[in-house]
Image (cartoon, rainbow, N blue to C red):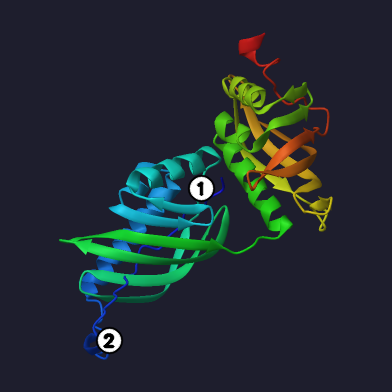
Amino acid sequence: MKIRLFLTLAGLAFCSASLTFAQQKEPTLSEQDRQQLDALATKYADAVNKNDAAAIAALFTEDGKFVTPAGILSGREAIEKTYQGLFKGGPTSDMVIKSLDLHGAGNMAWAVGQWSDNTGRGNWGAVDERNGDTWRIRMLTYNETPSTPRQELLALAKKFEEAWDNNDAVALAALFTKDAVLVNDSGPVYGREAIEKYYADLFKNVHFSNNLTTYNDSSCPHIMGTNGSEMWENGEWSMTWQVKGSDPVQGKGYHASIAVREDGVLKKRMLINNITPAQARPSPATTPSSQ
């Protein structure tokens, strides 16, 4: 399930059944309230960038609602569980929250705005509630602006770069489908579980950094079929690696892959790469620990 969580914790909705009140001028938020709501937004963005599901859920009221394209979540426990599942599918980072309209009265307020992160962008609406001196999210809803296939491809490439630079085998493997095939200079690796083990063994003795993926073909990705759920691409890669006890090595080469959507998320179904020139890239079979 693909659920992007972004929110600008700033907003409050105040509803009144009183016609007399509705005719009055809407009270404005105090400067203190605005500062507290800004702080709430900062805490939310920080928690998302740290991929901390528990910290995000704690920003909601106990009976808070999270309205997503996949359904309505009720309560902190359900919200935390959903965020945990999201982060397992790959890290979320670079969140930017922009509030476009903010209103409030008493202990309630509402806001609307825009969001963006490394997974996409869209619009949001939120209701916040104050209990004592603490503001929390009472209700959050969002949508996602449809991405072009190229934007999805570039977002996937960025996730690969981040996972390589973090030497994170789990994050890398999560970017492949369950039945994916990874083909490199040491041979094919079948399935997400085996791919994760391959990367984990590799990172034990080799440190990678400065990973960069480029697409020279301006028409990439190339759509396969009619529903747009499968595509292929090709381009170049470069990175730095250092085997323990050795000097850093700069490497580069070419790659090609087939990407498909698994549970709505674009992932690699097949990835093949080579290296240029004949400088052998380290693999679990050639690193010191496996000799």
**Residue 160 shown left or right of residue 109 in the figure:** right
- Label 2 or label 1, whichever lies nearer to me, is 2
What residue is shown at x 79% (from left), y 37% (from top)?
253
Residue 4 visible in image: no
Look at the numbered discs 2 and 1 and tell me whether their residues touch, using CB distance below 8 Å. Answer: no
* SS label for mark 2: helix
Return the mark for residue 92: 1
What residue is shown at x 53% (from left), y 52% (from top)?
70
| Percent of width and height locating residue 291 | 67, 8
* SS label for mark 1: loop
Q: Mark 2 points at which residue?
A: 22
Circle 1 residues within 10 Å: few <14, some 14–19, many ≥20: many
Residue closer to the observer: 229 or 88: 229
Amino acid marked by disc 2? Ala
- Is residue 51 placed above or below 115 in the rendered structure? above
Circle 2 residues within 10 Å: few <14, some 14–19, many ≥20: few
Amino acid marked by disc 1? Thr
